[in-house]
Amino acid sequence: MFVLFNTSNIHIVYASFIAYIFVNLFENLIHYNIGRFSNKNIKFVVPTKKDWIKIISVMVVFAIIQGLLTILLNKFL
């Protein structure tokens, strides 16, 4: 029977999730500022609380997807 989640797989998802969040948080801040100031002089501005919620929500969804894909690829490759 196909078992997707076991103890070692959960550790892979956790490590993948944490790495994705930390690395991509900085990348998303850069993209946020480029998009916000694309027709002006580029500044570095911290997003509003509403924008942070949007950014982190999208990041969490994709971090979960990355973790699940990591398990599947690890299992089948």
Image: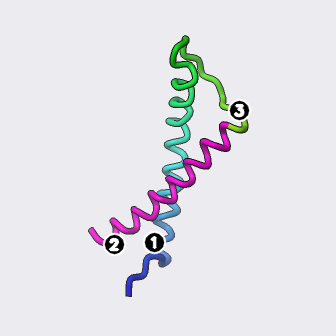
Mark sitting earlier along the chain (3/1)? 1
For this view, does 13 lie left or right of residue 56?
Answer: left
The amino acid pointed to by label 1 is Asn
**Image mark for residue 75:** 2
Using the numbered discs, state the Cα–Cα distance from disc 3 to disc 1 in whole angstroms.
35 Å
The amino acid pointed to by label 3 is Thr
Magenta range is: 51-77
Residue found at the far front of this picture: 39
Q: Which residue is mark 3?
A: 48
State whether the magenta stretch is mostly helix, strand or loop. helix
Q: Is residue 55 above or below residue 33?
A: below
Labelled pair 2, 1 in contact (Cβ < 8 Å): yes
Q: Residue at left 29%, top 71%?
A: 76
The amino acid pointed to by label 2 is Lys
Residue 7 located within the stretch drawn in magenta: no
Mark sitting earlier along the chain (2/3)? 3
* Neighbour tally class for label 1: few under 14, some 14-19, many 20 plus, Cα within 10 Å: some
